[in-house]
Amino acid sequence: MKSARPAIAGLCLANLFLVAPMTTAEAHPVTVKSCDREITFDAPPQRAASNDVNLTEMMLVLGLTDSMVGYTGISGWNKLDEAMREGVAELPELSERYPSREVLIGADLDFWFAGWNYGMRVGGEVTPQALAPFGVAVYELTESCIHIMERKRIAIDDMFNDIRNLAAIFGVDARAEALIGDWQSELDAIAQEITRGEPLRVFVYDSGEDTPFTAGRYAMPTAMIEAAGGRNIMDDVETSWTRVAWEPVVERDPQVIIIVNYGEVTAEEKIAFLRGNPGLAEMDAVVNDRFVVLDYVEATPGPRNIAAIRTLAEAFHGIDLAAITGAAE
């Protein structure tokens, strides 16, 4: 299996942000669960923003741009692809990296979609509690809740949960259910076609040379890998995205390595590092050239997770799911 760029299957990017007009919900007030909090909205937010490319894409697929005044935390890490550039063309970037509290208050926000280590840091100056006195309600990305509370597991349903909660907040529930229905159908089709034998050992390589930054038990790639018929070799690390030592990676000898592509170091450069380091070059995945490249927006919770699972399943099992299931490219 050669290094591969994933097709964005099951999600036509040309139509990604062409959604039905947003209609104001009659169901307000609505209350949603955000990590360990409940938040009530008397009406849909009017001056919203989102942090990071994957969270922003959730807002875009729900057709919420008319209610948005900008976004934060994308260009500072070189995460925008062409589809996202078009999607946010009418919106300003309020901060290239993590925003300060002053930036968010200065934009007169009434809503911010962010997460722990997705715009907010535990103990930092920007938190739901710090922004509440200024009229800014914060909805937290479900994957990120592990940083402030206990969780049992990570699941694709966590992304669905965020889509449903955002839709409830903004009064576009029907749009969310249509999207989730399509995504679930795609997952069901994948599950029917893949072989459920001994799962392949998979390592997620985000970045770092001295120590790798990777996906632990509660990071979305763990659920994606499992849905594709593999197992994250770091699924015993009790956090989401984190640094580990190279020694356990080598000892667990991954058969496939997922390269997360973003930032100044390219996927090709990351693969070259693995091949060129004598301590890493003997891992099964490196010897057999078994790399799968996913863009950051595919590897973090968001609308492109389902297509990325199909990419992983095809790579793990050596099959063409589009030919088998007739899925749209």
Image (tube, grey):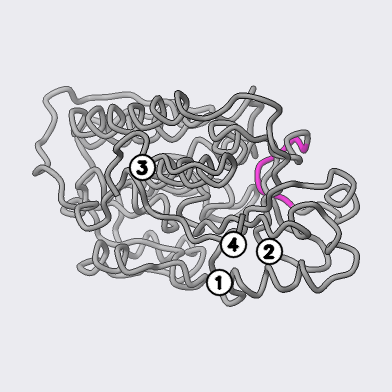
Cα gap from disc 1 to disc 3, whole angstroms: 30 Å
Give the residue at x 50% y 35%: 142
Which callout, 1 or 2, points at the residue further toward the start of the chain?
A: 2
- Is residue 26 visible to the viewer in this orientation of the structure? yes
Residue receiving disc 3: 322
Nearer to us in this view, 283 or 102: 283
Residue receiving disc 4: 3
The numbered dot on residue 207 is: 2
Cα gap from disc 1 to disc 2, whole angstroms: 9 Å
Residue 15 position in % (x across, y down): 19, 53
Q: Which kind of residue does numbered mark 1 sit on?
A: Gly
Chain part drawn in magenta? 237-242
Q: Which kind of residue does numbered mark 2 sit on?
A: Ser
Around disc 4, counting alpha carbons within 10 Å, would you say few (fewer than 14), some (14 to 19), or many (20 or more)?
some
Question: Is residue 139 shown above or below 26?
Answer: below
Question: Is residue 34 shown above or below 78?
Answer: above
Residue receiving disc 1: 263
Around disc 2, counting alpha carbons within 10 Å, would you say few (fewer than 14), some (14 to 19), or many (20 or more)?
many
Q: Which kind of residue does numbered mark 3 sit on?
A: Ala
